[in-house]
Amino acid sequence: SRSIRLAVIPGDGIGTEVVDEGLKVLQTVGPKVETTTYDLGARRYHATGETLPDAVLAELRDYDAILLGAVGDPSVPPGVLERELLLRLRFDLDHYVNLRPVKLFPGVTTPLAASGPGDIDMVVVREGTEGPYTGAGGAMRRGTPHEIATQESFNTAHGVERVIRYAFDKARGRDRKKLTLVHKTNVLTYAGDLWARTFDRLAAEYPEVTTDYCHVDAASMFFVSQPERFDVIVTDNLFGDILTDIGAAIAGGIGLAASGNVNPDRTAPSMFEPVHGSAPDIAGQGKADPTATILSVGMLLDHLGFTDAAGAIERAVADDLAERGDAVRSTSRIGDDITARVAG
Ligand code: NAD
Ligand code: IPM
Ligand code: MN
């Protein structure tokens, strides 16, 4: 069968540790994979000043998919690697859907005493190429008491429509067929108006999908008090970033939260990565949970059409989590255990 051409960007901190385990599982689960590793991240930046050279970006376009660990390091000023490497990949490869499942697996401890696995099973469709993430804005009179810093949220009719349409399609394919728009239309009136009008217009095309709306502050509360309210959520880039860390916390922790930066039109490779960052506080200690990365590998396989292999990973993770309970295990132990499960 065809083999997967995969670009791997382990990145910084625990990124390299969790990616090693994700690749172990990937190389065992079935489809043939040819990987090429790219040393982008803090070390390359310090050595050469480069974050994402144009030639590397061009090369990355030729792969079937990209697996990324995490980028960002305390030795690099905030924003340099995040913007010039990670966000540039998401923007230039047109990853307009940042797909982030929030699912509580059986046996996993949630801080929500009243909730069980059936109550927390949603997908956040986070816009990935616009909003406050474009970098639009500026500073005047920097360093003076009269400094003014602006950071604009950029929302296009095209960008808003395509991500909302994707979310409706996603909701239509799920059991509950419910889609919630999360925004802040009561304050962010220009952007909120565009999102709400677009949402309402598309809703008419999807009569089988139940819709509702939640302001982001209330949605944050409901994530904790009534997560069963949500099935599919569509929201902007920044709200989606924040909500999915809450989602990770309620579904057993940031070490379990997977994501895909998806280009649904397939004009460029999609990129899969855990929701978490480089975790400098635990880097190099073998403490990072690689489960989020392994689940992200499952999403990668699903995106490429290897649904059986994707299902095998999800089942292996579910079984491992059920067996693991609250036991604290090393990065490589978890990777080995899940690899053994997909092997046989
Ligand atoms: P973080 O996600 O790296 O860490 C937050 C907390 O969660 C830390 O206590 C960390 O130890 C813990 N944690 C994270 N992943 C874990 C795992 N797999 N297993 C166990 N514990 C885990 O977020 P942060 O501290 O805000 O950011 C650190 C750096 O990572 C920053 O430079 C930031 O910009 C970057 N970052 C990158 C990405 C990415 O590459 N997609 C995402 C988030 C943050
Ligand atoms: C994430 C991260 C990134 C984001 C940062 C590192 C740019 O927090 O993937 O959730 O805000 O999207
Ligand atoms: Mn984040």
Image (cartoon, rainbow, N blue to C red):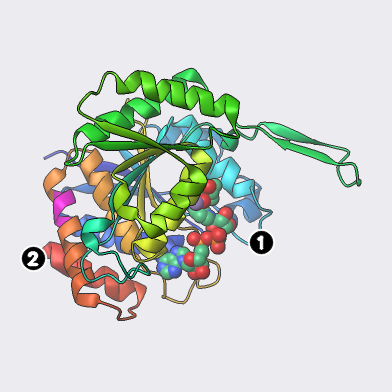
Q: Is residue 117 magenta?
A: no
Magenta extent: 309-313
Dot 2 or dot 1: first in sequence order is 1
- Quadrant housing residue 322: bottom left
The circle drawn on residue 27 is none
Q: Which of 147/315 is in front?
A: 147
Q: Is residue 213 visible?
A: yes
Front in this rendered view, residue 153 or 188: 188
Give the CA separation, mark 2 to mark 1: 43 Å
- Image quadrant occupied by the N terminus: top left
Instruction: Tell me the amino acid under the disc marked 2.
Output: Gly
In the image, the residue with mark 1 has its CB under 8 Å from the nearest atom of ligand 1: no
Residue assigned mark 2: 344
At 45% from the left edge and 26% from the top edge, which residue is drawn? 196
| Mark 1 residue element | loop
Please tell me how crowded label 2 is: few (under 14), some (14-19), or many (20+) other residues with Cα within 10 Å.
few
Quarter of the image where one finds residue 140: top right
Secondary element under disc 2, as helix, strand or loop, is: loop
Q: Position of residue 326 (x, y in %)?
A: 30, 79
Viewer-nearest residue: 326 or 56 = 326
In the rendered image, the quadrant that contains the C terminus is bottom left
Amino acid type, mark 1:
Ser
| Residue at left offset 59%, top offset 42% | 83
154 relative to 33, above or below: above
Whether the residues at callouts 2 and 1 have beta carbons within 8 Å, the answer is no
Q: Which residue is mark 1?
A: 75
Up/down of 219 relative to 59, above or below: below
The residue positioned 19% from the left and 39% from the top of the image is 174
Question: Residue 339, percent across and down?
Answer: 20, 66
